[in-house]
Image: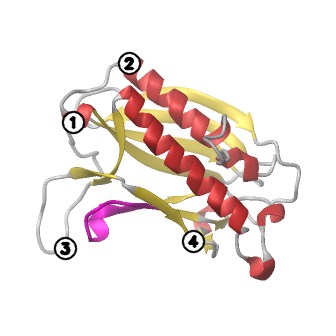
Amino acid sequence: MALPVIAGTVRCSVRGYLAGGAQWVNVLHFRFQGGAATPTASDITALHAKVERCYKGTAYGAGAAVSVAMPNSSGFTDVTYTPLDGSGISRVYSIAGAAANSNLTLPAEVTWVLTLRTDVRGRRYRGRLYLPTFTTAHLAAGGVLASSTATATVTQFEGFRTDLTAINFAWVVASYGKSPKAAWTPFATDITAVTMNPVADVQRRRKA
């Protein structure tokens, strides 16, 4: 499917690998200067520095980068940024490297979901990130995610969301397509909070 046109908005695809060779992908969207301008190459470079920090860099406050909970049998490949202006070229940045956690990995298809929330009701105004697989060390009784890991992950992404304002970006939920009953113009809505369910999800396409 062709990408939509949403003024001043960038599609970001973070890619990595899991034990056994399966791939994980997180797709995020960011709006530059309230949608009033298309970001330049230097703006994208600044954005990439924030994305890299969120996933495998310095913690935001009491948060923890995503890589902290990932096993060293998994890691990162690259990040692709595509302006949704209908003509801009994609830019690919390196984020290569394995995670550092030596604990045992959970199955590749087991994942936890970060829910992206806005101030507007409805499915078109929410998003999800199926995070990379974590290690067994981050499980609590009953097989749920340890509350400390969930809190640290949410804190990291909230710190990331807030930090984006320093470079004139906002993290958004982008609505691309058409409903079964009617077409609508693609649009993006600012994310106002992120939450995380401690119960694991499954993505079968990640199964090695």
Residue underneath mark 1: 35
How far apart are the two marked residues, 4 and 2, measured between alpha carbons? Answer: 36 Å
Tell me residue 199's x, y (percent): 63, 76
Residue underneath mark 4: 197
Mark 1 Cα shell of 10 Å, populated few (<14), some (14-19), many (≥20): some
Among numbered discs 2 and 1, the one appearing first in the sequence: 1
Among numbered discs 4 and 2, the one appearing first in the sequence: 2
Amino acid type at image mark 2: Ala
Tell me residue 5's x, y (percent): 20, 42
Against 23, residue 81 (above or below) is above
Viewer-closest of 94 and 148: 148
The answer to whether the residue labelled 3 contacts the one labelled 1, judged by CB atoms less than 8 Å apart, is no
Front: mark 2 or 1: 1
The answer to whether the residue labelled 3 contacts the one labelled 4, judged by CB atoms less than 8 Å apart, is no
Q: Secondary structure at mark 1?
A: helix
Instruction: Kindly tell me whether residue 32 is visible in this rendering.
Output: yes
The answer to whether the residue labelled 4 contacts the one labelled 2, judged by CB atoms less than 8 Å apart, is no
Tell me residue 57's x, y (percent): 66, 34
Mark 4 Cα shell of 10 Å, populated few (<14), some (14-19), many (≥20): some
Residue underneath mark 3: 180
Against 58, residue 151 (above or below) is below
Residue underneath mark 2: 41
Mark 2 Cα shell of 10 Å, populated few (<14), some (14-19), many (≥20): few
Question: What residue lies at 45% left-to-right and 29% top-to-bottom?
Answer: 47
Q: What is the magenta range?
A: 115-127
